[in-house]
Image (cartoon, grey):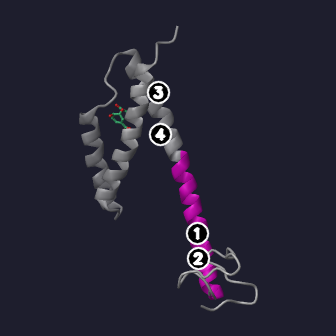
């Protein structure tokens, strides 16, 4: 493994602990043009991740309201028919966007499972006076 005078760095530019030996491909010289391209792409990834977090936060704000509405009106936490329609729709959108529809379905199911847990918790709470 090669190390520079300033010590080894990973591709993110983080200095490795002295004396450590990083696995092949995670250390050593990175061409400046590659570094620039990697940084540019990572900036976009960070922006996208921030947008995803904000969009999810907004979605959960809505679903919490749905949870309270359902609890007030004694509706069940889950609505499998609605979920089926959402999955079909999302799979179609994923296909058009060249995203793996199976991945889109798994992601939606993961989110919905969390929403249903929230709804169950809300339904178990005593009603507000
Ligand atoms: C939000 C609802 O509750 C549940 C959660 C859903 C979701 O997160 O999209 C969809 C259906 C329900 O199982 C709803 O009924 O609309």
- Residue at x-position 52% and y-position 7%: 129
Reading the image, the residue beneath label 2 is 38
Q: Could you say whether the residue bearing mark 3 is in a helix, strand or loop?
A: helix
Q: Which residue range is magenta in the image?
A: 31-54
Horizontal and vertical percent for residue 79? 28, 31
Q: Earlier in the sequence, mark 3 or mark 1?
A: 1
Q: Earlier in the sequence, mark 2 or mark 3?
A: 2
* Distance Cα–Cα, label 2 vs label 3: 41 Å
- Residue at x-position 28% and y-position 46%: 87
Residue 109, quarter of the rendered image:
top left
Reading the image, the residue beneath label 4 is 59
Do the CB atoms of the residues marked 4 and 2 lie less than 8 Å apart? no
* Distance Cα–Cα, label 1 vs label 2: 6 Å
Horizontal and vertical percent for residue 116? 37, 33
The front one of 78 and 24 is 24
Position of 8 with respect to 92 (left or right) is right
Tell whether position 36 is magenta: yes
Mark on residue 62? none
Magenta span: predominant SS is helix
* Distance Cα–Cα, label 3 vs label 1: 35 Å
Q: Could you say whether the residue bearing mark 4 is in a helix, strand or loop?
A: helix
Question: Residue furthest toward the bottom?
Answer: 2
- Residue at x-position 54% and y-position 81%: 23
The vertical placement of 3 against 39, above or below, is below
Reading the image, the residue beneath label 1 is 42
Q: Residues within 10 Å of mark 4 (few under 14, many from 20)?
A: few
Mark on residue 65? 3
């Amino acid at each position: 493994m090669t190390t520079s005078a300033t010590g080894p760095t990973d591709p993110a530019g983080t200095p490795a602990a002295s004396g450590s030996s990083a696995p092949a491909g995670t250390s050593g010289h990175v061409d400046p043009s590659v570094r620039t391209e990697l940084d540019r792409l990572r900036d976009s990834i960070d922006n996208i991740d921030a947008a995803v977090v904000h969009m999810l936060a907004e979605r959960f704000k809505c679903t919490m309201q749905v949870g309270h509405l359902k609890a007030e009106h004694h509706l069940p936490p889950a609505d499998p028919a609605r979920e089926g329609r959402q999955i079909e729709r999302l799979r179609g959108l994923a296909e058009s966007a060249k995203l793996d529809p199976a991945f889109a379905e798994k992601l939606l199911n993961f989110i919905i499972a969390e929403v249903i847990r929230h709804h169950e918790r809300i339904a178990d709470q005593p009603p507000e006076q």
